[in-house]
Amino acid sequence: MKLLLVASTNDLPALAAQFAGEFEIESVTDAPAALAILARQQVDALVVHLGIGESPALDVLYGARKQTPYRPPGMVVVADAFELRTVVEVMRAGAYDVQLAASLTPGMLAHSLRNATLLTQLSKRRT
C-alpha cells in the first residue's frame, strides 16, 4: 500500500519508517507538493502533520477528498497540540484519527493507519 506523509519535521518520517514493510512511503514537506502527488497518483493512506500549518494541512485533507472522491485515502492527522475546534475541522475534512505527536508511537500510528485504510476500503466496496 502507498502512504503519503506530509510533515515539516524529521520526527514523523523516522517514526513512519519503522513500519515501512506495510507501506511504500513517500514524504513531502508542504501542501503544494502533497497535492501534486495526489493529483498524479492514488495513495492508500495519508498522514498529515499539523506542523506544516493548520490551513495548509486542511488544504491537503480537503484536496485529497476532492481529487479522489471515489477512492479517498485513509487519513490520519498528527498534531503537536490542538484545540477541539481544530480536531472537529480535520475530522470534517475526512481524517479518521488525530494523534498527539508527543505520545505517538510507531504502533499507535500503524494502528490508526490500518483502521483508516480498512474503513476506506470497506466504504469503496459498498459503492
Image: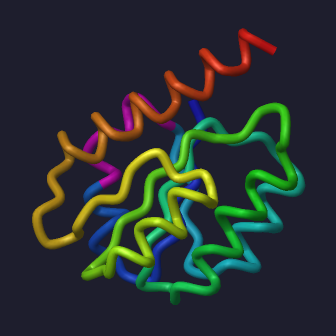
Image location (x, y in percent) of residue 80? 26, 80
- Residue drawn at the location 25% of the way across and 82% of the way down: 81
Task: Examine the rendered structure and indicate whether residue 13 appears above or below residue 54.
Answer: above
Position of residue 121 in the picture relative to residue 65 (left or right): left
Magenta range: 16-23
- 51 left or right, relative to 62: left
Residue 89 lies in what quarter of the image? bottom right
> Image check: 22 left or right of 5?
left
* Residue at the image point whose x is 82% and y is 67% from the top: 36
Instruction: Give how far across and how far down residue 32 sits, in percent.
Output: 76, 79
Would residue 101 appear left or right of 72 to someone viewing this image?
left
Say if the magenta span includes residue 118.
no
Instruction: Give the answer, above or below, for where 58 lies relative to 105.
Output: below
Whether residue 55 is situated above or below residue 17 in the rendered picture:
below
Quadrant in the picture for the C terminus: top right
Q: Nearer the viewer, residue 67 or 42?
A: 67
